[in-house]
Structures are given as C-alpha cells and as structure tokens.
Amino acid sequence: MNNLFFLSEFLGTAILILLGNGVNYSVNATKMFANQSGKWIVIALGWALGVLLGIIISNGIIENAPAHLNPAVSIFFGIIFQNSELLALIPFQFLGAIFAQVILNFINWSHIKETKAEIIAACHHTSPAFKKSYISNFFYEFIGTTVLLAAIFLLNKTFSTMKPVIVALIVLSLGLSLGSSTGYAVNPARDFGPRLVYFLFANLVLKRRKEFAAIKNWQEIFGFSYSLNPIIAPSLAGLILGLIIYAL
C-alpha cells in the first residue's frame, strides 16, 4: 500500500478532530464567544463540517484515498472487500486524532487555564448522560455507527462528487437525533485518541492546579470506566455489519 494512503488517513483524521473538538472548546470553554445557547446544534454542525473537510483533505493527498478517518469504517470495508491492508490505516487514524488534540490544547491554553476540569474533559472525549446505563449507552453507539456504515456503503454504490457532503449530512443527522445521550463518538479514534491526550495532559500539566490536585477519583474525571464503549460498540458494528453484507 502506498505510504501516501497512511498520510491521508493521518491528516484527514487530524482535521476531523481539530474541527470537531475545536467546536467543543468553542461552545464549552470559559470566555469563548460561542459559549451561549444552542450549543448542541453548533457542536453537531462543527463535527459534520469537520468530517467534510477531513474527507476533502484526505482525498486531496492522493487519488482514490480511502478517507475512512474511522477504525469502524476500515474494519467494515476490510471485511467486505476482504482487504486486510485497510486495517493498517487504523493506527494512523489514532495518531491523527492525538496530533490534532495536542494542537488544540496548545492554542486553547489561555481558555484551559480558566475552565473547569469536567469541561476540559468534554473538549477531549465523549461522556454519557447516564454512566451506569451500560446497555443503553452501548446501543446508542452501536446503532449510530451501524446507520453511518450502512449509509456510507449504499452511497459508495453510486459514484458522486457530492459524497463527502452527503456523509457530513449523515453525521449531522446522527448528532442531532442519536448523539445527545452519549456524545456520539461512533468512531474509536475520535474518542480514545483525545482521551489519551487528556489523561497525559491532566497528569503532567493540569494536576498542578488546585482544582485538579484535589481530585481523588481520577477514574471519574478521565471516564476510563466508559472509555471502552466508544471503542467496542463502533468496532463491533463494523465487524457485524461487514460480515452480514459479505455473506449476502
């Protein structure tokens, strides 16, 4: 596989996180002008446009770039096309997400210094409304990812230069309809990459702040008890739907 394919996934996912978690900072962080009413619409639009630009950047790196930007998508198409090389894209999706989150934290440092720990966490990773609703949280992510993958698969059957726009609209719809309970990760790289950055960032930098130093239950702040859900549910959706379609 051409190395530019790996670069395209890295940069595409980086743009996705940069714009997606960027809008999270914009509507949540202290003294941000977008921190007003109507936050969820802004977040959903920000992530949809992040997906759109991520796909455009990824496709612009090399012709016929997969532009998956999502391990669940790579698993899904890897099974359908019986192409294990697509799985090699996954590490670069995680690295792109981590890279973008580090940039976001750097440029938002002034806001971070005046923002509460829980809000900073929300600018990195998803978090469910009901932490102990394990089954509900799982199926929100599983069904959301399944809808996304099915739509992308059907979209790929008809060639269209509008595909990136349509995928972005699908993500927007998912965010508005199915996203507000779990934060709609529907993408393991989108959630765990920035979550890992938050873990390191809080331990190495933020822990010096009084608010962070007083925190005893780091599990709750980092959300590691929930962190497996945005990895397992979307990945299983890609695996199961891929196997079903391949068997048909």
Image: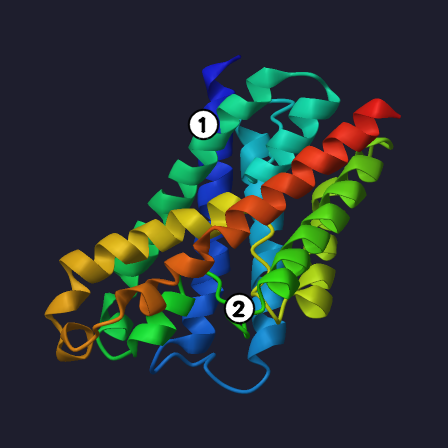
Q: Considering the image in quadrants, where does the C terminus appear?
A: top right
Q: Residue furthest bottom?
A: 37
Residue marked by disc 2:
128
Above or below 23: residue 38: below
Above or below, 164 against 89 in this view is below
Helix, strand or loop for disc 2: loop
Q: Amino acid at mark 1?
A: Leu
Residue 96 relative to residue 165: left or right: left
Q: Residue at x 67, y 37 (%)?
A: 238
Side of 198 relative to 57 (left or right): left
Residue located 60% across and 35% down the image? 68
User: Residue 46 occupies which quadrant of the picture?
Assistant: bottom right
Could one spot residue 62 in this view of the protein?
no
Amino acid type for the residue under numbered disc 2: Pro
Question: Whole-percent x and y of residue 147?
Answer: 76, 50
Residue 29, horizontal then vertical, whole percent: 37, 76
The residue lying at 29 percent from left, 59 percent from top is 105
Residue 50 screen position, x and y as percent: 56, 53
Residue density around tag 2, few if under 14, some if 14–19, many if 20 or more, within 10 Å: many
The answer to which image quadrant residue 224 occupies is: bottom left
Q: In front here: 224 or 22?
A: 224
Q: CA–CA distance between discs 1 and 2?
A: 32 Å
Labelled disc at residue 7:
1
Q: Is residue 93 above or below residue 110?
A: above
Give the mark nearer the N terminus: 1 vs 2: 1
Total labels: the figure holds 2
Q: Is residue 12 visible?
A: yes
Which residue appears at 21% of the width and 72% of the height? Answer: 216
SS of the residue under disc 1: helix
